[in-house]
Amino acid sequence: MLLKHIVDIIESVVPLEWQEGFDNSGLQIGNRNAEIHAALLTTDVTEAVVDEAIHLNCDLIVSHHPLLFHGLKTICDQTPQQRCVVQAIRHGIAIYSAHTSLDSYLHGVSADAAERLGMTDIRFLVSQDNIHGLGVVGHLTQPMSFAELLTKVQTTFQAQGLRYVAPADGLSAPVRTIAYCGGAGAEFLQDAIRAQADVFITADFKYHELQQAQNRIAVIDMDHWTSEHFAPYVMQHILADALPTHISQADQSPVRYL
């Protein structure tokens, strides 16, 4: 299948118009008329992921986070980003990124994570038109304690570590309604409170933002990559009928915990 047809399939589901103004989703590298035989799906584009694509004979990498987020002034081999660009071009590998465009999809990154946690009645946390938005809120089919939810989040996402603000009633407090936002979602804290969520799960909270949550809403804060690492599976569903796909095994968070 031609690259331009694969791009059309992706953007028919998650249009570029849905991305946030700061973002750079879309085709990063590649000839739109090139023939594509297999795709490697990943959260991040790293040198290890590019090497994996070469090894698997994939001529397309579809990532969640854009490789080219900030402009490059030189394309040499001085940074990992530059080396990824050079290797991809050298081996004829196209790169497409669906970042906040995929985040804005009702069945996208946040909704997929919510379903893995057992949530139902999923709706956008923030949306102006009910067609696309950011974050989700939903209900557990069976209430559980906050302590049980912590364990479920840790095992479901294979999180190396979690930070949390406990409910005002402590770890045994029942949880019924959860707000979830993949990636850095602290800006939606007030939206989660207005949605009457018992818990807000996201990544990259700062200390003073966590202070604002205390005694108002419980928070579970995880590593950014961990909160979105199921994104390749969402893309795999979108591309299921288009071409063979592989989920990257080299893709991993750079963050480690002592």
Image: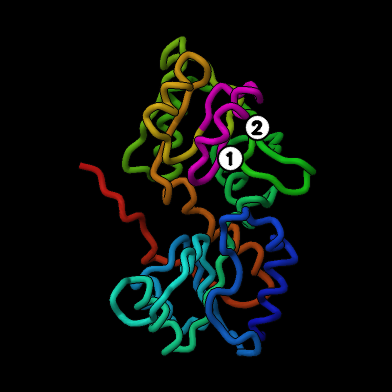
Image disc number at residue 114: 1
Residue 187, magenta (yes or no):
yes
Q: Can residue 14 be seen in this view?
A: yes
Q: Earlier in the sequence, mark 1 or mark 2?
A: 1
Identity of the residue drawn at 47% across and 53% down: 229
Which amino acid type corresponds to the residue marked 1 in the rendered image?
Ala
Residue 55, x across and y down, in percent: 38, 82
The secondary structure type at the circle numbered 2 is strand
**Disc number at residue 138?**
2
**Left/right of residue 137 with respect to residue 155 in the rendered view:** right
Say which quarter of the image contains residue 235: bottom right
Tell me where residue 117 appears, x and y as whole percent. 54, 37
Residue 48 visible from this viewpoint: no
**Where residue 149 sits in the image (x, y, percent)?**
47, 28
Q: Which of 96 and 150 is in front in this view?
A: 96
- Residue 257, compared with residue 62, is above or below; it is above
Q: Residue 55 carries which label?
A: none
Quadrant containing the C terminus in the rendered view:
top left
